[in-house]
Image (tube, rainbow, N blue to C red):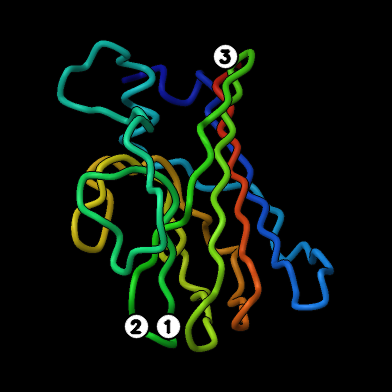
Amino acid sequence: MENINKIGIGGRVKAWITRLDGRKELVFDSHNAVDASYAADIVDAYDAGMNHALDNLFNGVTTPPPNGEDGIAFYDTTAGAWHEMIMDAPTANLGVTTIKGTHLCAGADKLIAATATHVLLGHNWLTTAFVNPVANVGAAWTAQAVLVGETLTIEWTITHAAT
């Protein structure tokens, strides 16, 4: 555990809203806050007590997200509910893992919360959080209105590189 700050785990989150006129608007581009348990799991790669594999991905628009699935979840303050995103398979290349989720707004206007813990990436969703969190967007996230018919896309990149 003493090498946790030397491994260089970091990441970046980008979010777009595809507006009704087809215009793709970048609404968020910032570094993310990597969860301490995820960093510790990387340092202790053989720790059998943690599993951060994104291997049972969210695949629908279920509210709330199904327990036991992985990916990106966000909280809609208008509806007061958590939402899953339809996930693409993660890609990995030279210590960089990228995962992308999309969500087509089909109900009432969505206001995705500005609270740091309200946009999450993780493994094994359980009721209102991930059992094994990977990262969250941090305080840089600002509330985003997503209208009916618009699509929210979030691309999350996690970098694992020795410093």
Q: Depth check: give the residue in front, 110 or 150.
A: 150
In-image side of 26 versus 145 (left or right): right
Q: Residues within 10 Å of mark 1 (few under 14, many from 20)?
A: some
Q: Is residue 112 above or below residue 138?
A: below
In the image, what residue occupies the spot 62% across and 76% down? 144
Q: Amino acid at mark 2?
A: Gly
In the image, what residue occupies the spot 41% across and 63% down? 61
Q: What is the spatial separation of the Cα atoms under label 3 and label 2, in whole angstroms?
A: 40 Å
Q: Depth check: give the residue in front, 157 or 147.
A: 147
Badges 1 and 2: C-beta atoms under 8 Å apart? yes
Q: Amino acid at mark 3?
A: Ala
Q: Is residue 9 above or below residue 26?
A: above
In the image, what residue occupies the spot 51% across and 78% down? 106
Q: Is residue 120 above or below residue 5?
A: below
Looking at the image, tell me whether mark 3 or mark 1 is earlier in sequence order. 1
Q: Pointer 3: what residue? A: 162
Q: Position of residue 37 (x, y in %)?
A: 31, 35
Q: Pointer 2: what residue? A: 80
Camera-nearest label, 3 or 1: 1
Q: Residues within 10 Å of mark 2 (few under 14, many from 20)?
A: few
Q: Depth check: give the residue in front, 10 or 150.
A: 150
Q: Amino acid at mark 1?
A: Thr
Which of the numbered marks, if any, corresponds to residue 143? none
Q: Position of residue 10 (x, y in %)?
A: 57, 34
In-image side of 72 versus 49 (left or right): right
Q: Position of residue 58 (x, y in %)?
A: 38, 48
